[in-house]
Image (cartoon, coloured by chain):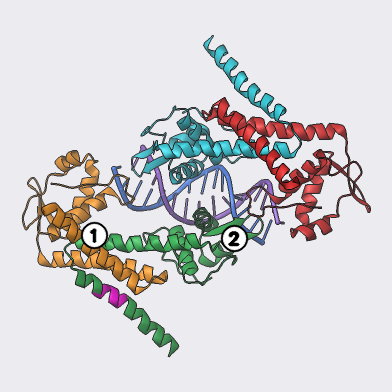
Chain colours: A orange, B green, C red, D cyan, E purple, F blue
Amino acid sequence: MLIKLDMQSRQPIYEQLITKIGEMVLMGQLSQNDQLPSVRSLARDLGVNPNTVQKAYQDLERDGVIYSLVGKGSFISGRTEVIAHLQERQLMKVTQAVLQAKACGIGKDKIQQCVERVYDTDLSREAQEKG
Amino acid sequence: MLIKLDMQSRQPIYEQLITKIGEMVLMGQLSQNDQLPSVRSLARDLGVNPNTVQKAYQDLERDGVIYSLVGKGSFISGRTEVIAHLQERQLMKVTQAVLQAKACGIGKDKIQQCVERVYDTDLSREAQEKG
Amino acid sequence: MLIKLDMQSRQPIYEQLITKIGEMVLMGQLSQNDQLPSVRSLARDLGVNPNTVQKAYQDLERDGVIYSLVGKGSFISGRTEVIAHLQERQLMKVTQAVLQAKACGIGKDKIQQCVERVYDTDLSREAQEKG
Amino acid sequence: MLIKLDMQSRQPIYEQLITKIGEMVLMGQLSQNDQLPSVRSLARDLGVNPNTVQKAYQDLERDGVIYSLVGKGSFISGRTEVIAHLQERQLMKVTQAVLQAKACGIGKDKIQQCVERVYDTDLSREAQEKG
DNA sequence: GTGGTCTAGACCACA
DNA sequence: GTGGTCTAGACCACA
């Protein structure tokens, strides 16, 4: 389970975990019924408090992204509605940021440049890494 | 001073205040050397503790957005470098959100639709207000 | 009465006034029994609140730097002991700053350079202004 | 954590705290990633309100001297640029005091004596402690 | 346990 | 009147 955490970030560790696991589901790196590492082993691997992983798993279960079987472990639910919901939520964040940007007097063109840069830069970076 | 606070929000009150005043500066609703309402009067108007407004004002002063004179009041600094910095910071937030969206497998077109919607919606709202 | 105030400074205006008048006494620009401008006229000239000038004059009188005659005005006392005391107090400030600098691990040589710079720079500046 | 506060001082408690911790960093008594006492424990030890310590810690974090992790604690950042900046700021204070002294007609020799006294006195104090 | 936010209210220096 | 500091104490999210 390759997860990079930013310990200095203002974003709570448990939220970073939720985001990362959500991304792995959306990108197909985690599929229906795949088993997640146990709370303790993941906590050990990441060097964080088990409570933190526990909190992330609980939230993911509450949102239907994973399901837990007592004594067996935690698994990806893979329900399509959940996946759609994850993407919607992320789009909402973009909308919020753009709304605030507009409230700051930032023009549509600036935002569009910003979007272009993100999608173009990453494509070229992936090309480099593959090439 | 028209400021709406969301008391239910996860975002702290003093941060909401900072954001709102920053927006008013960027939109030209507050200009250089304009006087802000006093800590106490704004606190009274918003129904929050003076300490909370004080914290917002002190953070704004540290960021160079306003300056405070004991015994006289708090005023907009209006330094251009500060204004530019405020906009950059907001653009960074958009970039972050878009980056995460991309990491979730959301396509460029979806983001662009989202941007269009934000800017078009507001235009129509302005049209309604004028018409 | 040529006095330049820094309205943006953290140092209170009344303290700036006290310092400036003290300096003028020490530099011989104000001599024994010289009359000071009235509280109101000085406040008007400087664009500050009369209370502020009043407070400065009161402190100066308490320290024996000036004396006030009701209905006549305020005057320089010019007592030698007072002049010596003003200089001592300023030296104390230097000592305090140097003590803190030493507590910060700053070496004696750095401080000495700093002293040289102040005295050399100003001499050359005075030369330019006179020449 | 040995910190002496002067409750009678005009200097605010939180500023005294900031100064003291800054000095300990500069003197190498606190090094990179060293953990500071928690807000509550330090407040208890010093007999002040936790909010006051909190304010000091937050200011130190904003200046890059320390970093705080919610749920874990506060730690020394140890960034060299920050350390250099702390010393520069202290030297500025010395320069200001010397400039004012000169404006008061105090000669260079008087200042130099004052510097000598500070650095010699402390050396003898260290000698006493060792001897 | 940790840091962060907030209230209610006092007191201060300053203009 | 103004901003700034501080206390006492509550509650929250997080690890």
- Which image quadrant is residue B68 in? bottom right
Disc 1 residue type? Answer: Gln
Q: Quadrant of the N terminus of chain B?
A: bottom right
- Which image quadrant is residue C122 in? top right
Residue at figure coordinates x 75%, y 31% from the top left: C88
**Residue D16 x %, y %:** 55, 37
Q: Nearer the viewer, residue A40 or D9?
A: D9
**Residue A23 x %, y %:** 17, 57
How crowded is the residue under tag 2: few (<14 C-alpha within 10 Å), some, or many (20+)? many
Most distant residue in the front direction? C131
Q: Which residue is mark 1?
A: B100
> In this picture, which residue range is highlighted in magenta?
B113-118
**Residue C128 x %, y %:** 71, 45
Q: Secondary structure at mark 2?
A: strand
Above or below: residue C71 compared with residue A81: above
How crowded is the residue under tag 1: few (<14 C-alpha within 10 Å), some, or many (20+)? some
**Residue D78 x %, y %:** 40, 35
Q: Chain of mark 1?
A: B
In the drawing, does residue C70 fall left or right of residue C93? right
Q: Nearer the viewer, residue C9 or B7?
A: C9
Q: Is residue B23 magenta?
A: no
Residue at figure coordinates x 24%, y 70% from the top left: B111
Q: Are marks 1 and 2 on the same chain?
A: yes
Is any part of residue A5 visible from this angle?
yes
Say which mark, if any, is on residue B74. 2
Disc 2 residue type? Answer: Ser
Q: Quadrant of the C terminus of chain B?
A: bottom left
- Which image quadrant is residue B87 in? bottom left
